[in-house]
Amino acid sequence: QVQLVESGGGVVQPGRSLRLSCAASGFSFSTYGMHWVRQAPGKGLEWVAVIWYDGSNEYYADSVKGRFTISRDNSKNTLYLQMNSLRVEDTAVYYCATLYSTFDWWGQGTLVTVSS
Amino acid sequence: SYELTQPPSVSVSPGQTARITCSGDALPKKYTYWYQQKSGQAPVLVIYEDSKRPSGIPERISGSSSGTMVTLTISGAQVEDEADYYCYSTDSSGNHWVFGGGTKLTVL
């Protein structure tokens, strides 16, 4: 069965960096684009970034552009999100997800807390 | 940046029809997806490509589209339908995705 397992969340000070990982299994990871979506405590869903199936294209929400980098290693079936210059407002649960029509799978999420 | 607009809340009595709208300039040209999220859980896809229902989603949940507005309709709403609902689509370039602000559906 399809599984997406995020890791790497935690508490970090403003201005610091953090890298999230998402381990995928149960499907052909290298044939699907992948997304990161976040949800701040008590708030709505916010799309963060997408990467093409082969890593050839990446697109970002304006709120993270220039600070976050999405990447993937198809040999390891793993998606990444490098988060630099973190701000308090980046505090959220971060989900990796497929979001491809009915091939719609989400991980359980990993909590990132940015606080001094 | 592109935005999708939803009402913050909708409230109906059990058995009534709930309608949740989502508006955006690119919606006439881009598909919309709807997600249901219950407290503490990951979102669940309930409508894809404007009006199609994934397997396992009750027939009382439907989607429709008209111009710059799409509508999620829950006919005969049940207490178990209480949740936050989000529309999701892309801007006109197709390269930036966006969620609506979410609508809290109360059935009581």
Image (cartoon, coloured by chain):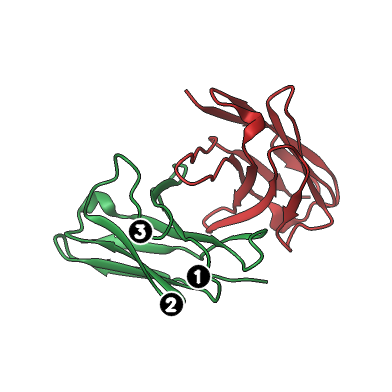
Q: Residue at x 63, y 45 (%)?
A: A35
Q: Which chain is red?
A: A
The reply, left or right, for residue A29 in relation to residue B67 is right
Are the residues flagged by discs 2 and 1 from a single subunit? yes
Residue B107 position in % (x across, y down): 24, 60
Q: Are marks 1 and 3 in contact (CB under 8 Å)?
A: no
Q: Amino acid type of disc 2?
A: Gly
Task: Give A7 or B67, whichever is nearer the viewer.
Answer: B67
Q: The residue marked by circle 3 belongs to what chain? A: B
Q: Are marks 2 and 1 in contact (CB under 8 Å)?
A: yes
Residue receiving disc 2: B67
Give the SS element for disc 2. loop
Q: Can residue B48 be spotted in the picture?
A: yes
The reply, left or right, for residue B93 in relation to residue B34 is right
Q: Quadrant of residue B62?
A: bottom left
Colour assigned to chain B in the rendering is green
Q: The residue marked by circle 2 belongs to what chain? A: B
Task: Specify the label residue B51 is tagged with.
Answer: 3
The reply, left or right, for residue A51 in relation to residue A84 is left
Give the SS element for disc 3. loop
Q: Amino acid type of disc 3?
A: Ser
Mark toward the start of the polypeptide (3 vs 2):
3
Residue A114 position in % (x across, y down): 73, 49
Mark toward the start of the polypeptide (1 vs 3):
1
Task: Give B69 or A109, whichever is nearer the viewer.
Answer: B69
Q: Amino acid type of disc 1?
A: Leu
Q: Are marks 3 and 2 in contact (CB under 8 Å)?
A: no
Residue A101 position in % (x across, y down): 48, 46
Are the residues flagged by discs 1 and 3 from a single subunit? yes
Residue receiving disc 1: B27
Marks 2 and 1, how far apart at CA: 7 Å
